[in-house]
Image (cartoon, grey):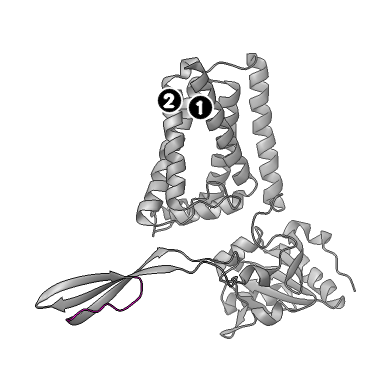
Amino acid sequence: MKYLVGAARWIVGILFVFSGLIKLNDPVGFSFKLEEYFSPAVLDLDFLTPYALAISLFVVILEVLLGVMLLVGFRVKFTVWSLLLMIIFFTFLTFYSAYYNKVTDCGCFGDAIKLTPWESFTKDIILLVLIVFLFVKKDLISAVATYKVRSLVCLLALVASVIYANYVLNHLPVVDFRPYKLGANLEDGMNVPDDAPKPIYEYAWKFNVDGQEKIVVTQGEYPSVEGEFIGVETTEIQEGYEPPIHDFTIEQGGQDFAANMLQEDRLVMVIAYDLAKSDLHAFTEVREMAKEAKSAGYKVIGMSASDEEQAATVRKKYGLDFEFYFTDQTTLKTIIRSNPGILVLHKGTVVQKKHHNDIDELTFKK
């Protein structure tokens, strides 16, 4: 039994540390996922949306800390109770998402490992079983060192997590798992291979046959039924291939300029998903950066989901000598975790990517 407890302890502890570190690398991304859960269409807890980032930081740091505490055997009773309450909450969320198809990706492992809603729920059920087992057998969870050493390890884990979180919040994630990372070509990311799996649909054809409704299910072909056709219901039973980059546009006046923009040899994108929520003081530096880039022969554009009036106001107030284009807000949030943030592209390939706090690190070759 002691060996089973040890195995469960290591599995749960390592998974919690790993999951927490992945999200700690990108707490802003996890906060966007929480906002999705808090929305009226999901849990209808919109009053929590303004606190999404704070909740994100608390949850991911706690996740790392609890994993470390379990591994070293520090305050076992508190640890297993906390793990049990956390996994019950997570299991409810993943079941709700899967059953009602509300959130298609729980964000359990950030952008590093994508899980379907049912895969996320299955993972949480396994963890729930293991944590309940540890809760029942908590007396068999032994300490791996003296109390002072265990206390020091947990304190170091907490301090390191806080320092790391502060760094990525004021810069960018250290490891970028998204399809807009340095070196990625956006056009390549939007392409669908010729041999890519196609979606499979199921069609439920309804007929009136001798006064009674008859349903015939096929995967596309029209059935040979002698009767009056009523209607058809279509259900996607297998998803097709979706390219890593989708819903990416650079629109202005109802026209998409993405194809042309991605052919530019020197392109600077100033990305602000919501100008009303931007760190507006940064646009003073953005203005100077844009002047420097233009003098070096770069084309500079702004990309935002805000309306033209808001964009015009910001341009006038900060003297920005470039135009804004419209792009989907979710896409912009995915591109860069900074509002505003800067992307420099060479024929569609990302060659520089900076948080607005690091604008001075950008270089423009003439």
Residue 225 lies in quadrant: bottom left
Question: Looking at the image, do the residues carrying marks 1 and 2 touch, with CB atoms under 8 Å apart?
Answer: yes
Specify the amino acid type for callout 2.
Answer: Phe
* 87 over 196 or under it: above or below: above
- Secondary structure, magenta segment, majority class: loop
- Secondary-structure class at tag 1: helix
Name the residue beneath numbered marker 1. Answer: 8
Residue at the (53%, 25%) spot, across then down? 7
Instruction: Name the residue rendered at 82%, 73% in the picture.
Output: 293
* Left or right of residue 181: residue 216: left
Judge the density around disc 1: few (<14), some (14-19), many (≥20) Cα neighbours within 10 Å: some
User: From mark 1 to mark 2, how far is it between C-alphas?
Assistant: 8 Å
| Residue at 58% from the left image edge and 67% from the top image edge | 243
Q: Horizontal and vertical percent for residue 35?
A: 49, 55
Region of the chain picked out in magenta, as a range? 219-227
Q: In the rendering, which numbered label is found on residue 133?
A: 2
